[in-house]
Image (tube, rainbow, N blue to C red):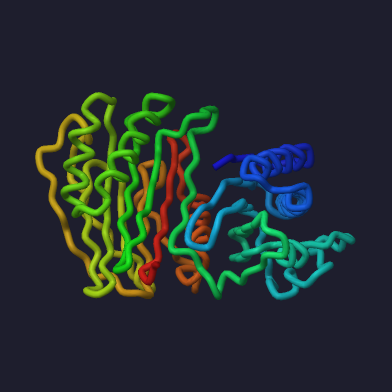
């Protein structure tokens, strides 16, 4: 994802430029690009006015709901004491004539928001290039979503993820190439290539194949998980510090990943099983996210759009000195 820090008005234009560039890259027409520009301008302006420090993340989504532009506005400002009022068209918490979040929601194909007074706001917008397309995220939540960004100052992302949706569940992987930069990216990209070749195998077999295949790279940390809906179980295998967790209501069950570096040193590769029901979430994070992440203080967030969950975890727990990835997969997917 493209990341734009927003602390002053001059950065609003940069956020808009990057969003339009991303929209053009996936074939948005002039009208759809204009919609993206309006949405990002409003979101970034709101961050400047009410949410500094904050940032805008812009990426491309491709899942069972389609393909389009995904935008996250994340801040640690004052938050909204009355979300209902903030979402009314024309409402502005600063008393200006701005159209506000209500207009953003109206222009979006999917929209979700969480705000906590004193802790900030996170807004998700998805935009489709299709004319007239609209969808309510509560009606068609995607199976998964992720926030993945390189270390600030880098263009290559040493992290990568993939999800293979199955009739009976899904299989997911996150790879974190050792270090950061182009060589780390090569390692994680090779892990994704091997995952695409072996995704129908068990997590252990996938991880064995990835471990063997990364020997010509600098290696990294890799974790693989498979959810079986019929048995309500999650099978997990990991080498290194890509950390997984099953979120079931207020309870977070952390998964076990064994020490080592995929591609170079793994004394043992072993699967572990955990209960995971249809209403649960699975979260998989590279070590650019602090291991003690939690969703405390955000009642109902686990039922929100997966991209919004990933965005809040990223905002609150990302480390400043590494690439960072948060993958969130719903238990009832696909």
Q: Is residue 269 left or right of residue 38?
A: left
Which residue is drawn at the image coordinates 61% and 72% (left, top)?
136
Residue 168 lies in what quarter of the image?
bottom left
Q: Percent x, y for residue 49?
A: 77, 52
Residue 196 lies in what quarter of the image?
top left
Say which quadrant the C terminus sits in.
bottom left
Say which quadrant the N terminus sits in.
top right
Q: Please say whether residue 75 is visible from this viewpoint.
A: no
Q: Please say whether residue 332 is visible from this viewpoint.
A: yes
Q: Percent x, y for residue 186?
A: 37, 29
Q: Nearer the viewer, residue 78 or 161?
A: 161
Q: Is residue 211 above or below residue 87?
A: above
Which residue is drawn at the image coordinates 15% and 55% (left, top)?
271
Question: Which residue, as the protein is rendered here, is positioned at the far right?
Answer: 97
Q: Is residue 141 above or below residue 119?
A: below
Which residue is drawn at the image coordinates 22% and 66% (left, top)?
274
Task: Give the number of callouts.
Answer: 0
Q: Percent x, y for residue 119?
A: 58, 59
Q: Is residue 61 left or right of residue 163?
A: right
Q: Nearer the viewer, residue 301 or 281?
A: 281
Q: Is residue 94 above or below residue 266?
A: below
Which residue is drawn at the image coordinates 28% and 72% (left, top)?
229
Q: Nearer the viewer, residue 69 or 260?
A: 69
Q: Percent x, y for residue 220?
A: 28, 34
């Amino acid at each position: 994802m493209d990341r734009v820090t927003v602390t002053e008005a001059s950065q609003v234009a940069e956020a808009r430029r990057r969003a339009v560039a991303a929209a053009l890259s996936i074939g948005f027409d002039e009208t759809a690009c204009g919609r993206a520009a309006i949405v990002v301008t409003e979101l970034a302006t709101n961050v400047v006015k009410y949410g500094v420090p904050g940032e805008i993340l812009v990426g491309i989504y491709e899942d069972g709901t389609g393909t389009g532009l995904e935008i996250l506005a994340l801040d640690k400002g004052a938050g909204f004491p009355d979300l209902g009022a903030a979402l009314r068209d024309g409402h502005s918490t600063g008393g200006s004539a701005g159209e506000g979040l209500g207009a953003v929601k109206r222009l979006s194909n999917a929209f979700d928001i969480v705000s906590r007074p004193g802790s900030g706001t996170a807004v998700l917008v998805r935009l489709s290039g299709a004319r007239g397309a609209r969808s309510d995220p509560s009606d068609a939540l995607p199976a998964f979503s992720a926030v993945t960004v390189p270390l600030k100052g880098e263009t290559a992302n040493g992290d990568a993820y993939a999800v293979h949706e199955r009739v009976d569940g899904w299989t997911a992987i996150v790879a974190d190439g050792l270090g950061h930069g182009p060589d780390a990216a090569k390692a994680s990209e090779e892990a994704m290539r091997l995952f695409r070749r072996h995704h129908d195998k068990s997590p252990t077999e996938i991880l064995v194949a990835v471990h063997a295949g990364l020997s010509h790279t600098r290696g990294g940390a890799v974790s693989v998980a498979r959810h079986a809906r019929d048995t309500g179980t999650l099978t997990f295998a990991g080498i290194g510090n890509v950390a997984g967790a099953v979120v079931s209501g207020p309870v977070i069950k952390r998964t076990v990943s064994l020490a080592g570096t995929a591609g170079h040193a793994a004394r043992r590769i072993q699967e572990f099983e955990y209960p995971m029901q249809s209403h649960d979430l699975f979260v998989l994070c590279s070590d650019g996210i602090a291991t003690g992440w939690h969703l405390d203080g955000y009642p109902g967030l686990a039922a929100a759009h997966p991209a919004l969950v990933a965005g809040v975890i990223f905002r609150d727990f990302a480390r400043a000195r590494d690439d960072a990835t948060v993958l969130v997969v719903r238990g009832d997917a696909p």
